[in-house]
């Protein structure tokens, strides 16, 4: 457990080393160059202060791009607390920069253990937010366990803290949240399940459902950065190898495209016949995991589902096969099963662990956690520019509309989504045509031109 516990619950940050701030500032400024849409929003926020007086708790990967979002929210008037949404994805220099140069409350240390991770979630909850921002629904999940009095389902650091609060105070922490935003597919799936069960306590904006988010972040961002993480972790030559991609959704499509671009023979596994057909038509070989297990050199899961690669598959794999995950949680490769069955792990290189199973060696990258964030730097800034433009506008939308919104999962309005695309095109120097009056009339009528 980190020092925060010994410094008491009033600590305003818990980071690795404040002396890293200068490097964090330099890298955050570099990312900012590629974030023109967020920059324009920041300039407007600084003038209009739409988040003035609002406390905002964010649970996001603490990267240079997130730093630019956090500063944008602060410029908009919000009092921001930030914790990590993954124990391995924090960039410690960025955390230091946000604390030192902006006074933002950051609770995140790369490689933090399970207890510290949840101690940091507790600190973000204790910020008593008006708005929460999640990447994987950790904050909203904890708030709902508090609301439903399911304290046994809270991680111990959060549970112990909640137990010290009065019933009225627990209620206030949840009822104080006017709305939330969610970044990723996995979080949105959980939130939709909560809304379906009628337990969602406040409206949530599914940033992931914006086209300017999932079309670009999940596809182009995950596609490139997953390959980047695998190459950085292994220094593997992708050309000529057989890469098995589990899941042909937004992320899987992006990664399959980039793996093929790097010269791999790409196989796809799916459970959805439509996606499988699309993968086949896109020129990939579609197979079951059982079939693919025998021939793959590198296996990458991007499904958002559990136990996609199981022990029976691992047993069938070739000696030296490499396994990585880029889905949100480290549940896609059955590591618990592997631990019970195989010998290991032996660290052979940073982020690479060797396991021995049935006389063969398998290599698991980054303990099955998001490889693009663990071993690389996550998505390039120009992709996060659009995702985080959505986050900033979603926070403003919550402030302006929370009272009118039902306790459900909502999309950001289409016109805001299109505005982000328009600003992005503008920043790239790309102009597009507009409808002529005749075209507008034609598209709206049923009796012309037949
Ligand atoms: N690495 C990153 O930076 C990053 C970025 C965005 C999203 N994500 C995460 O990646 C995951 C996938 O996101 P997405 O937007 O592509 O979702 P998606 O819903 O578009 O795609 C997931 C696909 O996996 C398939 N699938 C489910 N179970 C499967 C199984 N057992 N075997 C094979 N295929 C299976 C589904 O049919 C679907 O086509 C989520 O967990 C999401 O949160 C990660």
Image (spheres, grey):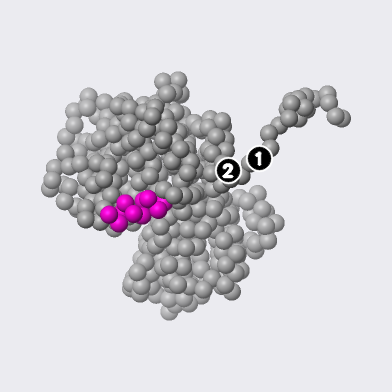
Pick out the residue farthest to the front: 429
The answer to whether one can see residue 143 in this image is no
The majority secondary structure of the magenta stretch comes to: helix
Q: Position of residue 355 (x, y in %)?
A: 38, 72
What residue is rendered at 68% in x and 37% in y? 433
> 259 or 325: nearer the eye?
259
Asked where in the image residue 39 lies, by quadrant, the reply is top left
The answer to whether one can see residue 265 in this image is yes
In magenta, the rendered stretch is 22-31
Q: Is residue 53 left or right of residue 224?
A: left
Height in image: 450 above or below 89? above
Mark 2 residue's CB less than 8 Å from ligand 1:
no
Pick out the residue farthest to the top: 404
Q: Position of residue 281 (x, y in %)?
A: 70, 56
Asked whether residue 25 is drawn in magenta, I would say yes
CB under 8 Å between discs 1 and 2: yes
Q: Position of residue 87 (x, y in %)?
A: 32, 53
Q: Position of residue 254 (x, y in %)?
A: 56, 55
> 286 or 207: nearer the eye?
207
Return the mark for residue 425: 2
What residue is rendered at 64% in x and 56% in y? 279
What residue is rendered at 21% in x and 48% in y? 14
Asked whether residue 309 is drawn in magenta, I would say no
Identify the residue position indicated by label 1 in the image. 432
Asked where in the image residue 415 lies, by quadrant, the reply is top right
């Amino acid at each position: 457990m980190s020092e925060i516990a010994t410094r008491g619950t009033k600590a305003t940050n818990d980071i690795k080393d404040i002396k890293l701030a200068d490097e964090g500032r330099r890298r955050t400024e570099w990312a900012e160059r590629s974030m023109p849409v967020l920059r324009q929003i920041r300039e407007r926020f600084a003038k209009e202060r739409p988040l003035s007086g609002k406390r905002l708790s964010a649970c996001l990967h603490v990267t240079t791009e997130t730093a630019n979002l956090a500063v944008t929210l602060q410029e908009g008037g919000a009092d921001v607390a930030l914790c990590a949404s993954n124990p391995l994805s924090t960039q410690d220099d960025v955390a230091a920069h946000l604390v030192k140069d902006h006074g933002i409350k950051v609770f995140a240390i790369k490689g933090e253990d399970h207890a510290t991770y949840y101690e940091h979630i507790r600190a973000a909850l204790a910020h008593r937010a008006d708005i929460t921002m999640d990447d994987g629904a950790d904050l909203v999940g904890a708030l709902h366990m508090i609301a439903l009095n399911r304290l046994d389902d809270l991680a111990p650091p959060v549970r112990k803290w909640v137990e010290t609060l009065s019933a009225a105070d627990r209620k206030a922490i949840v009822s104080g949240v006017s709305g939330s935003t969610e970044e990723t597919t996995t979080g949105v799936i959980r939130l939709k399940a909560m809304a379906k069960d009628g337990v969602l306590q406040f409206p949530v904006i599914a940033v992931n459902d914006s086209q300017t988010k999932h079309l670009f972040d999940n596809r182009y961002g995950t596609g490139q950065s997953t390959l980047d993480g695998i190459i950085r972790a292994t220094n593997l030559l992708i050309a000529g190898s057989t890469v098995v991609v589990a899941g042909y959704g937004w992320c899987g499509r992006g990664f399959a495209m980039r793996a093929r671009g790097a010269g791999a023979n790409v196989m796809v596994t799916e459970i959805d016949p439509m996606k499988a057909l699309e993968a086949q038509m896109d020129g990939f070989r579609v197979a079951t995991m059982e079939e693919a297990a025998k021939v793959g050199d590198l296996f990458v899961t991007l499904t958002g589902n559990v136990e996609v690669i199981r022990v029976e598959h691992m047993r069938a794999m070739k000696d030296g096969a490499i396994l990585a995950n880029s889905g949100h949680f480290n549940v896609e490769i059955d590591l618990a099963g592997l631990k019970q069955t195989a010998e290991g792990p032996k660290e052979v290189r940073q982020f690479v662990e060797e396991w021995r199973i049935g006389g063969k060696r398998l290599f698991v990258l980054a303990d099955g956690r998001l490889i693009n964030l663990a071993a690389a730097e996550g998505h390039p800034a120009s992709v996060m520019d659009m995702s985080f433009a959505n986050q900033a506008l979603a926070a403003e939308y919550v402030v302006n509309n929370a009272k009118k919104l039902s306790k459900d999962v909502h999309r950001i309005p289409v016109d805001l989504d299109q505005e982000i695309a328009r600003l992005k095109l503008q920043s790239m120097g790309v102009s597009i045509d507009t409808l002529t009056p005749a075209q507008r009339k034609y598209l709206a009528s049923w009796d012309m031109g037949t």
